């Protein structure tokens, strides 16, 4: 049973990591990154490191995600202002 | 040319991954020589706390933690000095989102309580200064997004004091132990528990303020910020 959980965790970690790296849409990449952070916290719990899991959930998924979302909104606002719409994005 | 560069990068990353995986396999295969968990369990009684992770972070390896806080303080100061707005707490930014405001009234007290609990729990179960500080910073981010006034985040004496408080107190304890004729950061016996709790409390405040300052210091209004460096 536990190996099934661990296997699912590993597969979903890999999928979210690849999705965050390869996504063309920056917003989607950030959401994938946050999902990756939460799954990573679960992985830390499975590795019996609850301290790191807490830090990962709070900093890795929460604060970093908010900072990245902020940065994405800046990029999109700058793009709207500087470039005509319809260009490659 | 560009394609070649990408190929080379991919090859280098793959090679590094394989080497790392081999190293991990080798480490997992070889017998464990050191018995760190047993050493830790044997000397846990002298550390002043009951949770092994906190004992390592704040007592046996507190030097590392001190340096980490130093790095965080430097990062927070660089973030603030990069801020392009003069006031870090701009009333024009307050959103009037009703839902966010209602959510906030429930969440902010709960999150503050959670941060206090995490700080207290650090001595005997998972938790501690870093986690509590992160929750504190998240509370600050929520307050800022909802537009609650936060006077302490204006650049000034209060902000600077908050940023360096944890590092300063930590360093003070370290130097005091040197002056008392012991090793750097060796707590006096009997006082270790209280000292660790005091250090963790100020560390929580400082970590929360540093992380929050990094968020708040990000350039906000489109008029003030310089050009935004093209495509990602």
Image: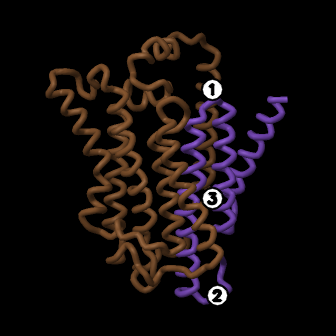
Comparing A56 with B182, the one in front is B182
Q: Which residue is mark 3?
A: B3
Task: Identify the residue at the far bottom of this view.
Answer: A84
- Viewer-side label of 3, 1: 1
Considering the numbered disc 1 on the image, is that residue within a helix, a strand or a loop? helix
The image's colouring method is by chain
Q: Residue at x 53, y 71 (%)?
A: B145
Give the percent coordinates (x, y) of residue B181: 15, 21
Chain B shade in the render = brown
Report how far apart the C-alphas of labels 2 and 3 lie in the structure. Answer: 28 Å
Chain A shade in the render = purple
Give the percent coordinates (x, y) of residue A49: 60, 32
User: Looking at the image, do the residues carrying marks 3 and 1 touch, with CB atoms under 8 Å apart?
Assistant: no
Considering the numbered disc 3 on the image, is that residue within a helix, a strand or a loop? helix
Report how far apart the C-alphas of labels 1 and 2 lie in the structure. Answer: 48 Å
Does residue B119 lie above or below A17 as drawn?
above
Q: Chain of mark 1?
A: B
Q: Residue at x 43, y 67 (%)?
A: B216
Q: Which residue is mark 2?
A: A85
Does residue B183 lie above or below A13 as drawn?
above
Comparing A40 with B90, the one in front is B90
Q: Is residue B221 left or right of residue A23?
A: left
Q: Residue at x 24, y 34 (%)?
A: B173
- Viewer-side label of 2, 3: 2
Q: Residue at x 39, y 40 (%)?
A: B200
Considering the numbered disc 2 on the image, is that residue within a helix, a strand or a loop? loop
């Amino acid at each position: 049973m536990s190996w099934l959980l661990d296997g699912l965790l590993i597969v979903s970690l890999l999928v979210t990591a690849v999705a965050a790296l390869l996504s063309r849409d920056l917003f989607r990449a950030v959401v994938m990154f946050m999902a990756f952070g939460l799954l990573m916290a679960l992985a830390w719990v499975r590795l019996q490191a609850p301290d790191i899991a807490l830090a990962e959930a709070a900093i890795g998924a929460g604060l970093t995600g908010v900072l990245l979302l902020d940065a994405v909104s800046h990029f999109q606002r700058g793009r709207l202002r500087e470039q005509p719409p319809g260009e490659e994005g | 040319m560009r394609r070649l560069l990408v190929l080379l990068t991919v090859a280098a990353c793959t090679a590094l991954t394989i080497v790392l995986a081999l190293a991990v396999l080798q480490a997992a295969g070889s017998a464990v020589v050191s018995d760190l968990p047993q050493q830790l369990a044997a000397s846990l009684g002298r550390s002043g706390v009951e949770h092994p992770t906190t004992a390592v972070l704040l007592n046996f390896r507190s030097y590392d933690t001190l340096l980490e806080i130093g790095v965080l303080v430097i990062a927070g100061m660089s973030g603030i000095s990069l801020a392009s707005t003069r006031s870090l707490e701009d009333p024009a930014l307050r959103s009037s989102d009703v839902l966010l405001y209602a959510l906030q009234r429930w969440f902010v007290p709960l999150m503050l309580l959670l941060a206090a609990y995490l700080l207290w729990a650090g001595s005997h179960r998972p938790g501690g200064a870093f986690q509590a500080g992160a929750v504190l910073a998240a509370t600050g981010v929520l307050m800022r997004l909802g537009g609650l006034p936060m006077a302490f985040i204006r650049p000034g004496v209060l902000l600077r004091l908050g940023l360096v408080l944890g590092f300063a107190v930590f360093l003070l304890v370290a130097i005091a132990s040197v002056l008392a004729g012991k090793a750097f950061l060796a707590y006096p016996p009997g006082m270790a528990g209280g000292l660790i709790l005091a250090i963790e409390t100020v560390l929580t405040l400082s970590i929360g303020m540093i992380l929050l300052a990094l968020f708040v210091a990000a350039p906000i209004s489109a008029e003030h910020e310089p050009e935004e460096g093209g495509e990602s």
